[in-house]
Image (cartoon, rainbow, N blue to C red):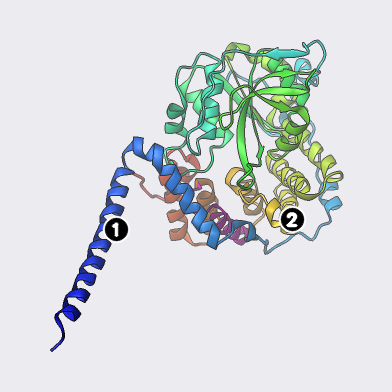
């Protein structure tokens, strides 16, 4: 017969193990329930999400994941650049109030007031606009916070929670596209908005001097993290100090940003800018923007800039220049050339040191998807989408689901395509493209 201790001690240990497991399960359930409470989710949820992502990245470093196109370009860089036609404008088109919906480039002819290039003459050496209400962004809420700040200048009284409810109904969504912000302004305010590429320092100063703060999208290199995208509201400039005054939702209000630093970081996003203005100011803004008022013309200007920079830059900057070339070709609907340009961009990505690889790029700029899709390279779309999900660490990008669904549909994988479209809509109910595809397929959405 066993001694009493030999029976009691193991029994007590097993009870302790069961009790510990019970506590862990109950704690997990309680934590899950509490995270459903908005105030707790706001304060704690982002930390859990951050830690979870860090753990995933520890075992699966995203910077080590490489996308290799299956149908890579055989054209030389010079051939890609030189084979791209420059469209000409021939016919006058009237543009109604609101964000212009432009026809093809060949159908356009700018009026005399809009053909002049913006100049930096006759503006003060220093301008500071007041009236932009600074907000520190909540977790991953850069886009909604900056849109709220820019709207506040024009008397809008909401805040980033209001913009986020429309722009980021899924809190884990990693990005808000500028086009979504324009849609918010047009639908939720009495103001107009437009987004363009191909801006420069001179244009930013002109707009600010005329009383129009500007939102830009640029690259950001945190001290303890990898490259990421970041929106910024420009509310002033000082030529003597060669710097802009910015309302940075991540760092601080009235943050100084040197011109030279801006030029390098702004390149990462094709020199993209967004402005908001009252409808009655349309002609003023049109004159300030010059040829950039026309969306297609802005792609031409940005294309020429990228073409020049490819000859001058190296390292990660060269990757961005090639990526910009592809994005501008997508804007000009030159999809085959765009696909070739993106092939070269991804080729240079592979050559970069791991610490320099901007693996978050496809979170923000999805141009390679339509480039490959409209070039008939459906498997490359799917492979890039899968790689992007590996980069992000969790499946939360509705644009990626949409384009993977389009490629799967083109390959006859209808059920998988429907699943992708439904996931895109679940992540973002205003994902109109995914909704349209589901309607075409006869799928009823709740």
Mark 2 vs 1, N-terminal side? 1
- Residue occupying the far bottom of the picture: 1
Q: Which residue is mark 1?
A: 24
Which residue corresponds to the image point at 45% horizontal and 21% vertical from the top-left?
Answer: 158
Quarter placement of the C terminus: top left
Left or right: residue 21 compared with residue 102: left
Of the pair 237 and 433, the residue shown nearer to us? 237
- SS at badge 1: helix
Residue 266, above or below 34: above
Q: Are marks 2 and 1 in contact (CB under 8 Å)?
A: no
Residues rendered magenta in the picture? 377-397
385 inside magenta stretch: yes
Which residue corresponds to the image point at 45% horizontal and 48% vertical from the top-left?
Answer: 49
Residue 355, above or below 254: below
Q: In the image, residue 92 lies at what x, y percent?
A: 73, 22
Left or right: residue 94 compared with residue 75: left
Q: Which residue is mark 2?
A: 352
Marks 2 and 1, Cα distance to the nearest angstrom? 43 Å
């Amino acid at each position: 017969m066993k001694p009493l201790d030999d029976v009691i001690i193991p029994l007590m240990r097993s009870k302790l193990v069961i009790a510990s497991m019970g506590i862990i399960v109950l704690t997990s359930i309680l934590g899950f329930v509490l995270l459903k409470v908005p105030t707790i989710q706001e304060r704690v949820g982002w930390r859990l999400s951050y830690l979870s992502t860090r753990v995933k990245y520890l075992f699966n470093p995203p910077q080590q994941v490489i996308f290799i196109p299956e149908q890579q370009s055989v054209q030389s860089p010079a051939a890609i650049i030189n084979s791209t036609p420059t469209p000409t404008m021939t016919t006058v088109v009237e543009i109604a109030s609101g964000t212009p919906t432009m026809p093809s480039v060949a159908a356009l002819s700018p009026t005399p007031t809009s053909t002049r290039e913006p100049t930096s003459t006759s503006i003060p050496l220093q301008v500071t606009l007041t009236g932009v209400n600074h907000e520190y962004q909540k977790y991953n809420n850069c886009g909604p916070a900056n849109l709220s700040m820019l709207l506040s200048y024009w008397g809008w009284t909401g805040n980033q929670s209001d913009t986020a409810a429309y722009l980021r109904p899924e809190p884990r969504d990693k990005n808000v596209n500028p086009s979504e912000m324009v849609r918010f302004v047009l639908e939720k305010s009495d103001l107009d908005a437009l987004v363009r590429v191909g801006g420069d320092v001179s244009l930013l100063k002109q707009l600010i001097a005329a009383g129009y703060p500007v939102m830009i999208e640029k690259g950001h290199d945190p001290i303890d993290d990898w490259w990421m995208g970041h929106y910024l509201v420009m509310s002033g400039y000082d030529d003597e100090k060669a710097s802009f005054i910015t309302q940075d939702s991540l760092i601080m209000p009235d943050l100084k940003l040197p011109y030279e630093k801006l030029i390098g970081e702004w390149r990462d996003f094709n020199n993209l800018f967004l402005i908001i203005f009252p409808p009655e100011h349309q002609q003023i803004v049109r004159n300030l923007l010059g040829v950039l008022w026309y969306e297609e013309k802005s792609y031409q200007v940005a294309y020429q800039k990228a073409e020049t920079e490819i000859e001058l830059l190296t390292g990660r900057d060269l990757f961005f220049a090639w990526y910009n070339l592809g994005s501008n070709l997508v804007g000009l609907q030159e999809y085959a050339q765009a696909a070739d340009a993106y092939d070269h961009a991804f080729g240079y990505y592979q050559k970069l040191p791991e610490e320099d690889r901007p693996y978050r790029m496809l979170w923000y700029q999805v141009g390679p998807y339509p480039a490959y899709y409209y070039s008939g390279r459906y498997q490359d779309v799917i492979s890039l989408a899968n790689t992007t999900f590996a980069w992000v660490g969790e499946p939360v990008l509705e644009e990626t689901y949409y384009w993977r669904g389009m490629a799967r549909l083109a390959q006859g994988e209808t059920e998988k395509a429907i699943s992708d479209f439904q996931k895109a809509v679940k992540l973002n109910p205003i994902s109109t493209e995914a909704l349209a595809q589901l309607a075409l397929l006869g799928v009823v959405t709740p």
